[in-house]
Image (tube, coloured by chain):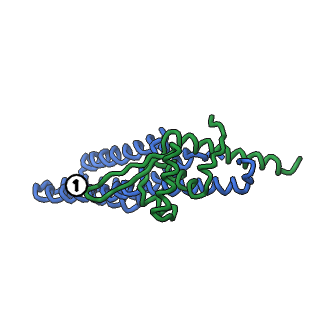
Chain colours: A blue, B green
Amino acid sequence: MSDDVSPAEAAQALADIQLRQQQVIDLAMIPAWYWWAVGALMVVLAIGVDSHSPGVIGLTVSVFVLGILAATGWVVGRAFRHAQIRNGLIDGRGVVAILGFVALIVAGTIGLAFWLRAAGAGHPATLACVAGGLVMGAGGPVLMRRLRAIMLGNRTGAAL
Amino acid sequence: MTVPRFDELIHSPTRLAIVALLAASEWADFSYIRDTVELSDSALSKQLTTLEQAGYAEIRKGFIGKRPRTSARLTAQGRAAFEQHVAALQQIVVRSGATILPAG
């Protein structure tokens, strides 16, 4: 049977396969708004911390938790309703990229907050989280592009 | 190293699209496959049944709350057959490239 398949037909079939696999991979991409939403929620939480007021802290923690649950629930629910990406598509490089991004945000934000407090700046947590939130919003889509490239490279037939 | 093996069952355009989607997934929802490949419910059921009978796919039926939910995934056998089929297609393209390249 394979003798009956022309090179053009085989190339078309490979292109179709690539398109279908790309559709699943694109589905797994977290939209840009999510990163900005998480960044904004970090700032809201930090405003509460800097206020030193139990009432404000309670309110901002509630907004943070509900916001994270809503945004993450939407992202996870979307994937759950459609398809779960194959685990093998994200290899060690993907894990390193994700952990590196998280470490950058956490260490950068906390480090900046302590440095601002030591320098006597007002609202150090809020200022640090504004910076962390900006990195989150701008860096999230960059992380997604990196993961997408890794997954496309690991899909079946990517070698050709 | 994947041994190229052309698979007639997978090569059908509709099944190729379905298997390619499943190959990138741990599992995929029936409605997602149906909408992405643009098939009717009955046509997709027929194709999934064919793949299931060949041992290439596994169909799961369950409920989320009261709503029925059907999902599909490739079996290990199906994934291996797909990888071999892709290798066979690549071999066809590569071989043709070797023969159609201008000499010198």
Of A21 and B69, the residue lying toward us: B69
Q: Residues within 10 Å of mark 1 (few under 14, many from 20)?
A: few
- Height in image: B1 above or below B104? above
Whether residue A134 is visible here, answered yes or no, is no
What amino acid type is highlighted by mark number 1?
Val
In the rendering, at what x and y percent does residue A18 appear? 59, 54
In the rendering, at what x and y percent does residue B20 appear? 54, 51
Of B71 and A32, the residue lying toward us: B71
Task: Determine the secondary structure under disc 1.
Answer: helix
Of A157 and A114, the residue lying toward us: A157
Asked whether, in this view, residue B57 is left or right of residue B92, the answer is left
Asked whether, in this view, residue A91 is left or right of residue A62, the answer is right
- Residue at 64% x, 55% y is A13
Total numbered circles? 1
Quadrant housing residue A136: bottom left
In the rendering, at what x and y percent does residue B65 appear? 25, 56
Q: Quadrant of the N terminus of chain B?
A: top right
- Residue at 11% x, 56% y is A53
- Height in image: B87 above or below B70? above
In the rendering, at what x and y percent does residue A25 appear? 49, 53
Whether residue B53 is visible here, answered yes or no, is yes
The residue to which callout 1 is attached is: A65
Asked whether, in this view, residue A103 is left or right of residue B104, the answer is left
Q: Chain of mark 1?
A: A
